[in-house]
Image (cartoon, rainbow, N blue to C red):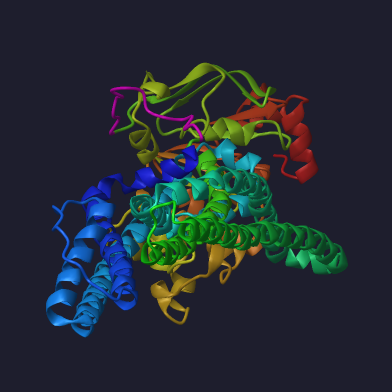
Amino acid sequence: MRTYFRIIRYLKPYRKEAIFYLILILLSILFGLLSFISIVPLLKVIFEKNTEQVTQPDFHLNPAVMIQWLKFYVNEINRHFGKLNALGFICVFAISATFLKNIFLYFAQRNLASLRAFIIRDLRMEMFDKLSRLHISYFRKRKKGDIISRLTSDVQEIENSVVSTLNIIFREPVTIIIFYAVLFGISWKLTLITLILIPLSALIIGRIAKRLKAQSSLHQESLGKLLSLTDETIMGTRIIKAFNAQSYVIEKFRNENNFYTRLFKSIMFKKDLASPFSEFMGVAVICVIIWYGGREIFNETGGLAPEDFIGYIIIYTQILTPAKAFTSAISTIQKGIASAERIFNLTDAPVIIRNKPKPVTINSFERGIEFKNLTFAYENIYTLRSINLYIPKGRVLALVGPSGGGKSTLADMVPRFYDPLMGDILIDDISIRELELNSVRALMGIVTQEPILFNDTLLNNISFGQPHITEEQIINAAKIANAHDFIVKLPNGYHTNIGDRGQKLSGGEKQRVSIARAILKNPPILILDEATSSLDSESEKLVQDAIYKLMENRTCIVIAHRLSTIQHAHEIVVIEKGEIVQRGVHDELMQVEGVYRRLSRLQGAGG
């Protein structure tokens, strides 16, 4: 139950509300108990013909004494005012106790609803916060659907299976304990007999719960796969149709969906077994109580009065409902715990890229960027080896070479998306590991091959991460990026929502919006990762013109497949298999036989 109590720790900021809930629920249980205790003197009034004067007991919170105290006052009313008035007193007492019980229960439930909402809100927020800080490699190793499943369905499962049972986990055991205390006060012998059967029930329910937890974990993983398959199908619908692969993806989804269904059925069978089993055990115990208690009364050896015996049975039956709810909750919680473990696997994932204690904040870029003997490996596969480069401020460095050579990885190390295995990167002669991470990234603008846009307005996409920018500044940036003309033609102009990933825009339009975003940030360092490689000629011309404007007076790292776009770079570095194999300007590299010249000829970009 360690995982369960870890979820409960999310109540810590809301101690006052939790304590108030506990007080209300205890009062509810207490008044519920009083309403049932009144049954014993009620039976005594109905069945006893003669009433004798009894000594008044001292009142204190002991169940047996409470019963004797109530018996005394009912007996006194019966002696002085008659049976009918005694019955009336008991009825008013029971109604009042029940009314107060439900008033306290209602406000307890209201209080708990707020606590449940706070727990789920904080848990979801913690997950999202951790997702935003996790290393990029974390996402490369996992399917997007599985991550989304954890943030949505797993959190919902915790809400349904764990948080929703908070009242049961506390209220029902307390109710059972208090009612058992009353039963001990009536007859300790009968109560001991009922307790003998509890370990057997706990053993069987424990075995069911263990199996349930294991299958629930598989169930949530399967749901993640279904979400991944759905996402892939939506994103790849053109390829699926072009290759007539609908049958293939449908069959793939059907197999996973059938597996999910089998798991769901098995989980529900086990979950639904707990309640009828607990009810069966409860009825069996009642039969034992009736047999043993009846024998005690018939033999007149147990000191158990008939009204006490009937009251005992009635009170014991009230234990069956909370016991049934508690055993069902234990099974339900196992499903939630499986989801919680998946969530905590995410929230406990280490943040690999983080600030050192007392990092140096860098507010400006003055000299240059240096790569010193840099080596990088991903999952024991070396992608960069012994890279040494220096990029002076205001210069353009172009990285070219075959795909998979390590160009993008090298560029990703400048904003510290990765740290090198060996060697270092220096910005203005300071190790990047010594610099405050956000201040480093504030110096940089990035334009990628696949524009990253969000399901929001153009205005908010261009000003992304800069909430205090004015609309006039946004429009100026769009004009420089050659985006203004197409934006104003849209139905709502800059306030047009561009859909998921900007799907309402063409490739060239998306790229120009991405460039406008970088222009608005006005960074001294710019990283362009194959920004025009996927565009047609007309779009490329517009985008390339925007890029030239963006590159003015900035230090640029440009990754390009189309060599015609980087011929005027101050230095071109050719990377192949993680190593620098050539470096120089375009004209120099074209004079020697090598990778650059070969790539240039293949593209017809030779000068």
Query: Residue 367 appears in which quarter of the rendering?
Result: top left
Front residue of 402/15: it is 15
Residue nearest the viewer, comparing 348 with 364: 348
Residue furthest bottom in the image: 84
**Residue 311 colored magenta?**
no
Between 49 and 494, the residue placed more toward the observer is 49
Q: Against 284, is 372 above or below? A: above
335 shown above or below 310? above
In this picture, is 16 found above or below 356? below
The residue at the point 78 percent across, 25 percent down is 593
List x then y, in percent, for residue 590: 71, 31
Q: In this view of the protein, which residue sits in the foreground, 247 or 419? A: 247
Magenta span main SS:
loop
Q: Is residue 472 shown to the viewer in this render?
A: no
In the rendered image, residue 358 lying in the magenta stretch gets the answer yes
Side (left or right) of 463 relative to 417:
left
**Residue 239 visible:** yes
> At which x and y percent is residue 141?
65, 39
| Number of marks present in the image shown | 0
The C terminus lies in quadrant: top right
* Residue sitting at x 41%, y 29%: 354
Residue 55: image location, x then y, percent: 14, 58
Residue range of the region highlighted in magenta in the rendering:
349-363
Q: Position of residue 531 (x, y in %)?
A: 58, 49
Look at the picture and state if 511 lies above or below 526. Answer: below
